[in-house]
Image: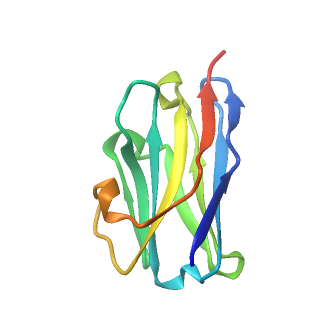
Amino acid sequence: QLQLVESGGGLVQPGGSLRLSCAASGETLDYYAIGWFRQAPGKEREGVSCISSSRRYYADSMKGRFTISRDNAKNTVYLQMNSLKPEDTAVYYCAAVRGIVVGIVSEYEYVYWGQGTQVTVSS
């Protein structure tokens, strides 16, 4: 069974950068779409980005600041986050579903989830 583990979160100042990793084990990610979601305190979980086959999708507020990529050899998906803002503070989760995903879809479309990693943007 596929297992996902996020890492790379932490405390960063506004304008700074972080790179989150989503490392998979149990199966290869080659046939999975991977999504990044986040949940801030008191708010619903929202989609951030998705990589499906060779296509990449971003929520509007992340376009131009976040970049999703995958390293098949390492069975890992990354989320590079630049120009971070205090409103980016949240727990970030990666999720996977076998097959093709088009766009930023509902969290309920995903089957496998990591435990999350905290990102705090503050001065």
Vertical comparison of 51 with 17: above or below: below
Residue at the limit of the structure toward the top, as seen here: 123
Asked if residue 76 can be seen in this view, the reply is: yes
Q: How is the model colour-coded?
A: rainbow
Quadrant in the picture for the C terminus? top right
Image coords of residue 58 (percent x, y): 38, 53
Image coords of residue 43 (percent x, y): 37, 29
Quadrant in the picture for the N terminus? bottom right
Foreground: 99 or 111? 111
Image coords of residue 15 (percent x, y): 60, 28
Image coords of residue 99 (percent x, y): 37, 81
The tally of labels here is: 0
- Residue at (42%, 61%) from the top-left corner? 50
| Residue 67 left/right relative to 23 | left
Asked if residue 104 can be seen in this view, the reply is: no
- Residue at (55%, 79%) from the top-left corner? 29
- Residue at (52%, 27%) from the top-left corner? 85
Foreground: 15 or 25? 25
- Residue at (38%, 41%) from the top-left corner? 45
Vertical comparison of 101 with 5: above or below: below
Vertical comparison of 2 with 81: above or below: below
